[in-house]
Image (cartoon, rainbow, N blue to C red):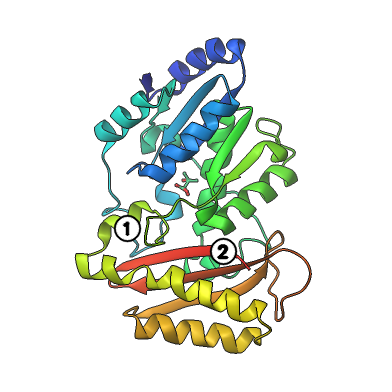
Amino acid sequence: MQTINRLDTLRSALEKLAAEGPVALVPTMGALHSGHLTLVRAARARAAHVVVSIFVNPRQFGAGEDLDAYPRQLAADAALLRAEGVAVLWAPDAATMYPSGYATNISVGGVSDGLCGAARPGHFDGVATVVCKLFNQVRPDIALFGEKDWQQLAVIRRMARDLDLTQPHVDAIIGAPIARAEDGLALSSRNAYLTPQERAQAPTLARAMQAAIAAIHGGAPVAGTLAELEQALLAGGFSAVDYAELRDADTLAPLAERGTGPARLLVAARLGRTRLIDNMAA
Ligand code: PAF
């Protein structure tokens, strides 16, 4: 595995790899866990070569968020990726990604609004901007993202469609199912912030969501069920619920009632200093 942090070196390495077959990109911010490795394995099954990017993107963190605290462990991450047969670890620094004078922002309307977009203003502009740059830097045939960030995936697909991207084409942007711990907690690099007591409380989120989905499928009114879900989280030790919403799975349009199309329950809630997000088919 080559670890590369210069764009010209990346381009020459990719020229050789692309000549040998399809290239897959797995964009990450590092602090890799088994969910990321599942993505890497899915990428390896689909492409001749896998490129993983690790870049803690300052533009997607708001003032007062955890940019400085975000776990950084490049050497350990590189060892994991080497063992998975990754061809290239693309690890640019901030000056390479956003050189002096950088002035361009990508803002995706509609799907960026509400949910995490409301609690984290500017977050999805930062995500869309860096992912567009990563796509242009690597020019992958396919790209894989975890479904834990369901809204992020919708934003990236919208961007790829709207900007007529071809590498990757929107249809080659693949979402991988959420990797969960045995107790149901969705895997996340931010789970590292949880104290042992909070880690024990955290699975309440997935359990309360499953109960809400069962209630909605059983005919319970959506608004009342979501209010009960919030109460269950607060009773279970969460300090605040940023949102608990039923949305159309594709457009993310709010759903007051469960219709016939695919729906998604999306929740963000705070446990101590950690903000946990999760989503499930509903
Ligand atoms: O999901 C993430 O880790 C990040 O938002 C991403 C897609 C790598 C962009 O920085």
Looking at the picture, which amino acid does disc 1 mark?
Answer: Asn
Rendered image: mark on residue 166 = none
Quarter assignment of residue 33: top left
Apparent side of residue 278 relative to residue 187 in the rendered image (left or right): right
Apparent side of residue 251 relative to residue 242 in the rendered image (left or right): right
Residue 167, image x, y percentages: 66, 30
Apparent side of residue 253 relative to residue 17 in the rendered image (left or right): right
Task: Specify which label sits upstream in the sequence, 1 or 2.
Answer: 1
Q: What residue is disc 2 on?
A: 280
Residue at (66% x, 87% y) in the render: 221
Residue at (38% x, 31% y) in the render: 91
Q: Is residue 177 above or below residue 209?
A: above
SS state under label 1: helix
Q: CA distance from mark 1 to mark 2?
A: 18 Å
Q: Split into 4 quadrants, where in the image is the C terminus?
A: bottom right
Looking at the picture, which amino acid does disc 2 mark?
Answer: Met
Judged by depth in the image, the label closer to the viewer, 1 or 2, is: 2
In depth, the one of 134 and 271 nearer the eye is 271
Quarter assignment of residue 82: top left
In depth, the one of 185 and 49 nearer the eye is 185
Observer able to see residue 139: no
Q: Residues within 10 Å of mark 1 (few under 14, many from 20)?
A: some
SS state under label 2: strand
Q: Is residue 222 above or below residue 4?
A: below
Q: What residue is disc 1 on?
A: 191
Residue 137, image x, y percentages: 54, 28
Q: Split into 4 quadrants, where in the image is the N terminus?
A: top left
In depth, the one of 253 and 84 nearer the eye is 84
Quarter assignment of residue 100: top left
Residue 151, image x, y percentages: 58, 59
